[in-house]
Amino acid sequence: MSEPGEAHQHALDIFLQQRPDLRAELQTLNPLAAQAKKETMEQYRAERLHEAFEAEAERLGLFAWELTLQLVARSPEEFQARRLEVHKEVAQMAGLSWDAYCQLHGLAE
């Protein structure tokens, strides 16, 4: 499996490829807006892309990392298996029982 950063970048590439309108919008951003934020155009575009990605995840009722998994998974079954694996790791790190964690996040086992 690739590193989390590589998977996320791959997911961003897929996300952008699936949205030509967003790709066009990112190419026509105002350079003065980037300059006002003391960012390069590349940094400014990347920030807008991440905002769009997170907004889409929220619209779908997912965490951004879940959308990343969904976009890079080879099948819906792989997505579900990997998603549950990560959720179980988070529950363990948080010191919550799996049942309590599932209730908290509305997950079905």
Image: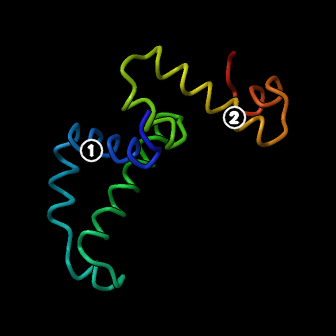
State the residue in front, 86 or 56.
Answer: 86
The residue at the point 61 percent across, 33 percent down is 86
Q: Are marks 1 and 2 in contact (CB under 8 Å)?
A: no
Of the numbered discs in the image, which one, if any, rests on residue 83?
Answer: none
Judged from the image, the secondary structure of the residue bearing numbered disc 2 is helix
Judged from the image, the secondary structure of the residue bearing numbered disc 1 is helix
In 3D space, how far apart are the residues under numbered discs 1 and 2 (Cα atoms)? 26 Å
Q: In this view, does 87 lie above or below 55?
A: above
**Could you tell me the amino acid type at mark 1?**
Asp
* Residue for badge 1: 13
Quadrant assignment for the C terminus? top right
Q: In which quarter of the image is residue 75?
A: top left
User: Between disc 1 and disc 2, whose residue precedes?
Assistant: 1
Q: Quadrant of residue 37?
A: bottom left
The residue at the point 20 percent across, 74 percent down is 30
Q: Is residue 53 above or below residue 14?
A: below
**Could you tell me the amino acid type at mark 2?**
Glu
Of the numbered discs in the image, which one, if any, rests on residue 89?
Answer: 2
